[in-house]
Image (tube, helix red, strand yellow):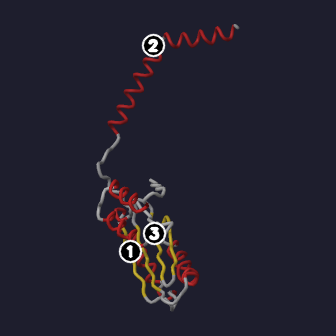
Amino acid sequence: MAKSEQGSGFIANVKSSYFPSIFLFLSIVIGSVALWLTPKEEDPQIVVPMADVIIHAPGLSATQVENQVTEPLEKLVSQIDGVEYVYSASMSGQAQVIVRFFVGEDRERALVRLYNKLFSNQDKIPQAVSQWMIKPIEIDDVPIVVAALYSETPDKIGLYELRRVAEQASLGSSLLRIQIKLRCLVESQELSILN
């Protein structure tokens, strides 16, 4: 019983002292100063050098493109200083390798290093590769929202209807119009819109 009286006595002493009000006042002052000193920019320019390497290898299957073109290219590009991530996609007859450098890397120097690495290793390009190109990507070129439209009943809602909805959406229709259009297409079936 003596411990609980001491504990409640300590809490009662803290509550009745000036400590809570001084602590609250200092927290508000320090928070306000931190907010005032934090640099703010309305539209910050974030430099993330990126490039697509697009390879055409007609006649090769997706597995052959992956084994003969994509994997060796990934290893080669990964050796470049400043490369953070390498993504790739292999398809029948073509491949795409996305090279992303560290945030803050000088864009021109990063792209020059990529060009130099690829052009200095042209002798390693397989015979099946007919052409390849490097396309620099800006961070603003990366989509924020990607939507996939599909039909579980293709006999009722075909590719033509889905294409029309996608074209209207890409022309800048509002989300509400898209939802209404989707509801019309689906008729009485259940509709799920995922954010």
Residue ID for mark 2: 18
For discs 3 and 2, the disc positioned in front in the rendered view: 3
Locate residue 129, reporting x and y percent: 48, 88
What is the C-alpha distance between the residues marked 3 and 2? 73 Å
In which image quadrant can residue 65 be found? Answer: bottom right
Name the kind of residue labelled 2 in the image: Tyr
Residue ID for mark 3: 156
Q: Is residue 177 left or right of residue 83?
A: left
In which image quadrant can residue 144 be found? Answer: bottom left
Q: Residue at x 39, y 27 (%)?
A: 28
Q: Nearer the viewer, residue 131 or 40?
A: 131
Q: Quick check: 29 above or below 74?
A: above
Locate residue 11, reporting x and y percent: 57, 13
Which of the two labelled residues, at mark 3 and mark 1, occupies the earlier sequence position? 1
Q: Number of callouts in the render?
A: 3
Name the kind of residue labelled 3 in the image: Lys
Q: Quick check: 77 above or below 187?
A: below
For discs 3 and 1, the disc positioned in front in the rendered view: 3
The local crowd at label 3, few if under 14, some if 14 to 19, many if 20 or more residues have their Cα within 10 Å, is few
CB-based contact (under 8 Å), mark 2 and mark 1:
no
What is the C-alpha distance between the residues marked 3 and 1? 51 Å
Q: Residue at x 53, y 79 (%)?
A: 70
Residue lying at the far bottom of the rendered structure: 127
Locate residue 156, reporting x and y percent: 45, 69
Residue ID for mark 1: 112
Which of the two labelled residues, at mark 3 and mark 2, occupies the earlier sequence position? 2
Name the kind of residue labelled 1 in the image: Val
